[in-house]
Amino acid sequence: MGIPSQHEYEQREIRAAQAQRAAVQRAPLRDRKEAQLAFFEAMRDDPALVAERLGWLLDGNYGYGAMMLAQTVLRQPRMNRQAALTQMIGVYEWQCPEDMTRAAWKRLSPGEAAALGREVRVAISDAEEALDEAAPQLAGGNWPAPSPAWAGSGYWKGHPAYVSHERLARVDNNMGRWEIYKVKYRTTPDYEGGTQIEIYREGQLEHGESFEPALHNQKGEHLIQDWIEMEYGQDNED
């Protein structure tokens, strides 16, 4: 077996990071509630710790795939990066599912949320500066920049665990073309199988999470709109 290419390596690492997120989502309810409480207390009592761990995520301490997913968010300034990255570190450090991180954040008082926001903004600014400093090296070819997960029309081409997909909706607005899919994966040594909900913007993966009938029983258009409003903090129906 030959040495994997950079692209193959990136895709393998992304699959591993996505599998970890899916595993957190499928953990026993008791474990998820304990993780949610621990993350809530960290956001409330020690926002600097949350920001520090976010910096670790963006530096690759939770794996190259997780770093790539986090840096994809970092490179989208129109996105609600504070919310998205806070949710991600809730998953990777505290093992708290993304939907439960949002519920935990909503329990913060306005002052607590503001304190957390200040710390997270500093972490984002520091990470942006680090990326800017690394850009000349990346451009020089010393280390290729991460490629988007499943970019382009063949989203799942070559994915070793892919089984089938169903497009639930497409929405075109002033932010671009959005698509939402229900995707089935088989279990492999590198990927925990199951059904995922995946949202794409202009051919690039924006979000993926485990399919839960109770959570995803709306029309696809509404799921896309809910995601836009949550992540970008605005209504984009134009």
Image: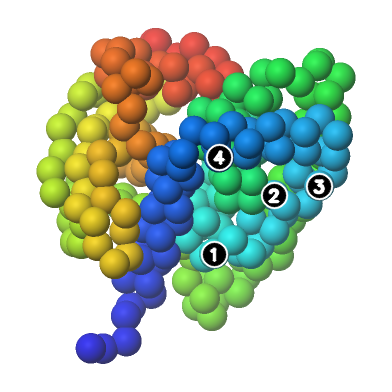
Distance of mark 1 from mark 2, alpha carbons?
13 Å
Q: Residue furthest front?
A: 30
Who's the residue at 32% across and 87% down the image?
A: 3
Lower sequence index among marks 2 and 3: 3
In the displayed structure image, the side of residue 15 where residue 69 appears, left or right? right
Kind of element beneath mark 4: helix
Q: Which residue is mark 3?
A: 49
Foreground residue among 89 and 156: 89
Q: Which residue is mark 4?
A: 31
Kind of element beneath mark 2: helix
Question: Which tag is nearer the camera, tag 1 or tag 4?
Answer: 4
Q: Amino acid at mark 3?
A: Leu
Question: Which tag is nearer the camera, tag 2 or tag 3?
Answer: 3
Q: Amino acid at mark 4?
A: Asp
Who's the residue at 41% across and 40% down the image?
A: 26
Assess whether mark 1 and mark 3 are in contact (beta carbons under 8 angstroms): no
Give the quarter of the figure containing the N terminus: bottom left
Foreground residue among 59 and 108: 108
Q: Amino acid at mark 1?
A: Gly
Q: Can residue 56 be spotted in the picture?
A: yes
Lower sequence index among marks 1 and 2: 2
